[in-house]
Amino acid sequence: MNLRLSAVLRRRLIRWPPFSRRLLLVGFDLLAIPFSIWLSFWLRLAEPFGANLMASLWLFPVSSAVGLTLYALSGQYRGLTRYVSSVAFYTVALRNAVLVVVVYLLGTVLPVQMPPRSSWPLLWLLLTALTGGVRFLLRDLLLQAGASPQSHQANVVIYGAGNAAAQLASSLRLARSHNVVACLDDDPLLWRRELDGVVIHPPRHLPDLIRRHQVQQVLLAIPSASRSRRRNIVETIQELGVPVLQVPSLEEITSGRAPANALRPVAIEELLGRDSVPAHPSLLGPGIAGANVCVTGAGGSIGSELCRQIIALKPRCLILFERSEPALYAIHQELSRPAPDGIELLPVLGCATNPVVVRRLFVDQAVDVLFHAAAYKHVPLVEANPLAGLSNNVCSTRVLCQAAADLGVSKVILISTDKAVRPTNVMGASKRVAELVVQAFALQQVELSGKTRFAMVRFGNVLGSSGSVVPLFRQQIASGGPITLTHPRIIRYFMTIPEAAQLVLQAAVLAQGGDLFLLDMGEPVLISELASQMVRLSGLSLKDARNPDGDIEIVCTGLRPGEKLFEELLIDPTSEPTLHPLIYRASENAISPSDLWPQLDALEAALANHDVTSAFTLLAQLVPEWQAASVSSESWHS
């Protein structure tokens, strides 16, 4: 059969209505049963029309009647032939085994001559091969008939040869949207073997495969690979100028949230930072399981992730304290689907600077643990609205700590930032004052033998959080550029939101009172390199002096008011390790409560009176490293 005739037959086959295709299968089975009987005698006795066959002619009508009845009643003709799999083949084999057994039993009770015993297993094998094989043949014909023209398929290479790669290859073959020309894997034992009919090569063959097959994409199918390994692979492929897509994570595939062929670009968040470190078994759960936990800023980037992870630790009640109605609605709806088993989920719309609301909440809900993640954190916005930033970041911390100390909350954990170290902006200075407040309450608890433990967790930039550079760069790339970079040598430390939240929860267990915990942020990232890599991950090219015809340009705009080239985590460069390898405990100078409270009273009065000059004077006294001159007088309007 030539290719043109084959294509015509495939096109006609797919135009047939489903009922006609079922009749085709019934007709083939009606021919396959007697043919298998005849062939079993011939193969067994080497006689195509011997005496044994003539004496066993009763097998033909009986087997056909029993077989078609059994096939119809057991659903052999209900399945979609286009999606026949190995499971369907096993089912066909089982049906044929039942058919052979039933016919054999009938032969023992009917007055007929039985064929040789060895012909029965042979009959089962032949029936299974014929009835099963024709279904796979028909499936492939239907898939080819419904496929797009070969010229529309992208030639791709799958990186990986594990379970995810097998699912991806099978899905792509079924969808006929991509032409898989090769697979790659690091395991030498898999080289030159095949996955779904595709040869597995060592990674070093990729340049040659790209050249020979005009590969248009490389598909990463290694969801369990470490971040560092994934980063090395992506960088190697990017040097070859081929776009990289990846399958969903192993968790997304196994949970059913995404199919294996749901290809998407590699997100920069999945490449930055170090490999994840497992949680210390003794640091997740104690103090939270069975407790009433409150998270302020529950709708924010860090607060919402804290809530997600706290739910998994089985508190008795989780209080979502948030001033933004849309943010509170979003996180409450997310955590309510499905409803947490035995966990009370309480959304509270309110402001943490209101002492009446805070105290009423703590009393009514008997709060045991408080995570204070509510803050204004966008440096330019707080720089332009400094009094609002000071009021929210400092006053809320004092209100919460005072209520916690008075009402016997077990632990209070402040989420702080590396911008509080030698701050050059109002946001960082406000967070440093918030740290001083927590330290002062911790000292006061020691003096009064109180039971509330106050602690702080300080870390750097969080990938994907509101206001971080990654979403901004992604938006600028989607808009066609340019990417705006404040300085070509600016560097930052990055951590993923889930990892930051998990480390905060573990640090809470380590808190003894007055602790300042630092999270190991890994290696710093040059932001210009981050921007360049995001451009390449988007399948675009960088426009610069070496490539004037590129797609996206990076433009340096100059450092913003209060912005530093690099951030620090320590004021006093000393820290000690803890049980967790990524969590360190530091000791830094504090201000005694007797000295701090009058200054805070004066600061709050200045904020209430909208007295910018007095507020900045007091802020400079509390945080000597901060310089009020760094704030433009034009921005003192808030």
Image (cartoon, rainbow, N blue to C red):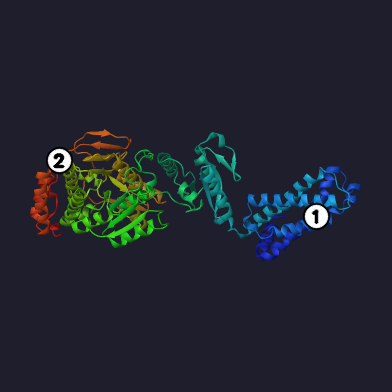
Coordinates of residue 410 in the picture (x, y in percent) = 25, 46
Query: Which of these two is toward me, 89 or 439?
Result: 439
Query: Which of these two is toward me, 334 or 452?
Result: 452
**Residue type, label 2:** Glu
Determine if residue 489 is in view.
no
Q: Residue at x 84, y 46 (%)?
A: 41
Coordinates of residue 39 in the picture (x, y in percent) = 82, 48
Quarter location, residue 439: top left
Q: For mark 1, does the 10 Å Cα neighbourhood hold few (<14), some (14 to 19), or many (20 or more) residues?
A: many
Query: Which of these two is toward me, 454 or 172?
Result: 454
In the displayed structure, does residue 27 sit left or right of residue 239?
Answer: right
Marking on residue 63: 1
Q: CA distance from mark 1 to mark 2?
A: 94 Å
Q: Which residue is mark 2?
A: 447
Coordinates of residue 305 in the picture (x, y in percent) = 34, 51
**Residue type, label 1:** Ser
